[in-house]
Image: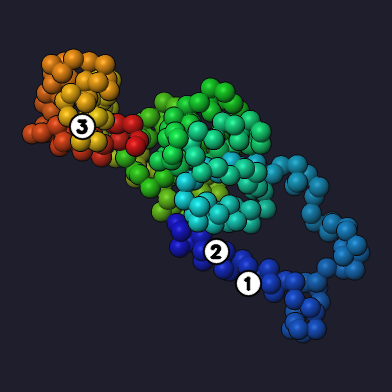
Amino acid sequence: MVQDVVEALVVRNYEILQEHRPRMLLPTIPPDLLLPMEHSRGHLPETVSPDRFLSMIRILLAEDQQLLRGALASLIDLEGDLEVVAEVERGDEVLTAAIAACPDVAILDIQMCGMSGLDAARTLSQELPGCRILILTTFGRPGYLQQAMEAGVSGFLLKDSRVDELANAIRRITRGERVIDMGLAASALSSGNSPLTPREEDVLEQARTGATVAEMADATYLSPGTVRNYLSSAMTKLGARTRTEAARIADEKGWLRPT
């Protein structure tokens, strides 16, 4: 998607430069393509309806990578009916920004500092149910899709989606539709639901960091013996030989909370 964004911006910027060059430097432009003089005095062409500006879709963009966030915002703003009204780089900034900007759609990455995009989506759905949520992420994990649906998300796309797919998805979810990456949806159906209990997920999340049993016990407020029992149960369910392998399998499936 980053390459698509850059290419689209280069093309559009060239078009804008051509549109605003002096007429004397563009003798080959047909006269009927130039605005009449009254339009240069602030009048809109008759083909442009004032209602168009009332139907703008307001967008909040939450993405921790500054370069990608800026490129996406610039590209979205090139669409005639889409407007980025707020940008944040942290998950724990989403709700505050949404309350202030009143967006129609919030586009959220999954892995962000402060709070994951999935947790931010849950909070946003509860506090601002009128705001549609679209997850845009690199991580096409079936478990993440399931968590997103449970959080009230309306759309889930991968960052390698085409730019026009993103723009159309934004429009569709504002109409009440649900937009899901088809490949990921098929993968989620074949993977099934997580077999892990919440406590097994808790200890595997600790195992993912390389924590010892004693450290896991402290973090989860469990006894070391109970932690070992949960680890053993999770390993059996996932067919793993070690707790590290079990944590890796669960993480790749998207059954653990994003880091």
Q: CA distance from mark 3 to mark 2?
A: 45 Å
Q: Would residue 195 be seen by someone viewing this image from the given angle? A: no
Dot 3 amino acid type: Ala
Dot 2 amino acid type: Ala
Q: Secondary structure at mark 1?
A: helix
Along the viewing direction, whichever of 229 and 214 lies nearer the viewer: 214
Dot 2 or dot 1: first in sequence order is 2
Along the viewing direction, whichever of 89 and 167 lies nearer the viewer: 89
Residue in view at x 69 percent, y 72 percent: 17
Q: Is residue 228 above or below residue 138?
A: above
Residue in view at x 64 percent, y 57 percent: 78
Location of mark 3 (residue): 211
**Picture coordinates of residue 20, whole percent (x, y):** 75, 71
Q: CA distance from mark 1 to mark 3?
A: 53 Å
Location of mark 1 (residue): 14
Q: Are marks 3 and 2 in contact (CB under 8 Å)?
A: no
Rate crowding at label 2 as few (under 14), some (14 to 19) or many (20 or more) other CA atoms within 10 Å: some
